[in-house]
């Protein structure tokens, strides 16, 4: 995905009927019964006391709550989306026994998939995305310290530096963050085009995560181009757990990965993925497109819990956390 694919004005014009499907709140149920006048606020629903899961309600209560959720089709503000996707409070706490202000890292992924499991169409994710998806994409970047991405995805998606957004400036300053998230590229070969804006004009210096055995010449070229090379593996490649820890040691605790599928599969296999933000696109593409995660299968499937579900025009925006 690319941050500026859809102009901001166009995104706002088309965002008009997002609604929260889960979790269901007391306020939603009140609205459904006609006893309340207010709409449902995303910030109040996230982790709020009194949140009610449909599986825990009676049949009548569940039906009423669901109808209440249907009543709140409206455009969500960026503040509401930021509250709905806020990182856990533990991320801002110093890590036990850590020095230099190191934080407890939280790695979330943001991916999009069609109904038949395709993560891309013609090699890119944009054709299966939507304006609301891009709005959430921008929000997740606005919350993150660093965006971790595979080198192949950088090449395919035409990655540019993350930009500073006025809507998030005050919140980022209050949280001790820079004006925009850094981009951290995972690459064993460092076979990258160092004439790209990622290296020539980033607001925050671009990082490259690689192994200790990476070619010294490529490392020198990357550093000459202004990139910060971070060792996160003993061999040529990157070890996912070490990458997470290395970024946390640099002060990057709010981690966001946007893939691609091979990199996400490595994070899944290593057991270091804490959260998946998944957009389910109501499209069918067939063909041989990649899934959102590739690579070898894990020995035992990992269970994630649904913590939030939004909907707009048939697109589902789910937030799942490791149980």
Image (cartoon, rainbow, N blue to C red):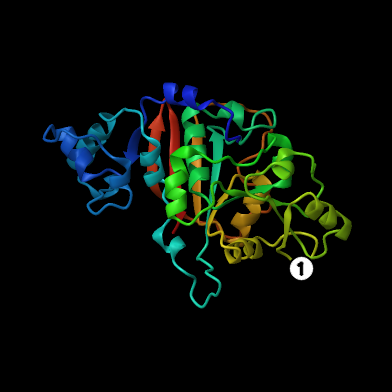
**Residue 64, picture quadrant:** top left
Q: Position of residue 156 (x, y in %)?
A: 72, 36
Toward the left, the furthest residue is 35
Q: Is residue 269 left or right of residue 212?
A: left
Nearest the eye: 207 or 299: 207
Q: Is residue 119 above or below residue 16?
A: below
Q: Is residue 279 visible?
A: yes
Toward the right, the furthest residue is 217
Q: Is residue 175 above or below residue 170?
A: below
**Residue 266, picture quadrant:** bottom right
Residue where numbered disc 1 is placed? 234
Is label 1 in a helix, a strand or a loop?
loop
Q: Is residue 59 above or below residue 209?
A: above
Q: Is residue 282 visible?
A: no
| Quadrant location, the C terminus | bottom left
Q: Is residue 271 left or right of residue 305?
A: right
Q: Position of residue 40 (x, y in %)?
A: 26, 38
């Amino acid at each position: 995905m690319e941050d500026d694919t859809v102009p901001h004005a166009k995104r706002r014009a088309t965002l008009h009927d997002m609604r929260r499907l889960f979790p269901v709140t007391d306020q939603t149920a009140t609205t459904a019964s006609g006893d309340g006048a207010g709409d449902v606020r995303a910030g109040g629903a996230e982790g709020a006391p009194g949140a009610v899961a449909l599986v825990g309600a009676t049949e009548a209560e569940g039906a009423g709550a669901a109808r209440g959720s249907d009543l709140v089709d409206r455009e969500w503000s960026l503040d509401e989306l930021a509250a709905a996707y806020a990182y856990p409070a533990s991320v801002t706490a110093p890590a036990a026994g850590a020095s230099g202000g190191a934080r407890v890292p939280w790695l979330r992924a943001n991916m999009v998939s069609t109904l038949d499991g395709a993560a891309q169409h013609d090699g890119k994710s944009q054709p299966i995305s939507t304006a609301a998806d891009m709005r959430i994409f921008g929000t997740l970047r606005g919350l993150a310290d660093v965006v971790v991405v595979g080198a192949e995805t950088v090449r395919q998606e035409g990655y540019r530096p993350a930009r500073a957004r006025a809507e998030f400036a005050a919140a980022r300053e209050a949280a001790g963050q820079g004006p925009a998230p850094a981009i951290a590229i995972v690459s064993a070969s460092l076979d990258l085009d160092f004439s790209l804006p990622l290296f020539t004009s980033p607001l925050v210096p671009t990082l490259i995560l690689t192994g200790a055995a990476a070619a010294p010449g490529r490392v020198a070229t990357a550093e000459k181009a202004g990139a910060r090379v971070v060792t996160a593996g003993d061999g040529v490649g990157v070890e996912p757990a070490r990458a997470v820890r290395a970024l946390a040691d640099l002060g990057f605790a709010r981690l966001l990965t946007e893939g691609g599928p091979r990199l996400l599969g490595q994070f899944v296999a290593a057991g270091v993925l804490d959260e998946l933000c998944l957009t389910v696109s109501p499209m069918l593409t067939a063909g041989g497109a990649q899934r959102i995660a590739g690579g070898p299968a894990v020995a035992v499937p990992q269970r994630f819990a649904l913590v939030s579900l939004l909907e707009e025009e048939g697109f589902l925006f789910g937030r799942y956390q490791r149980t």
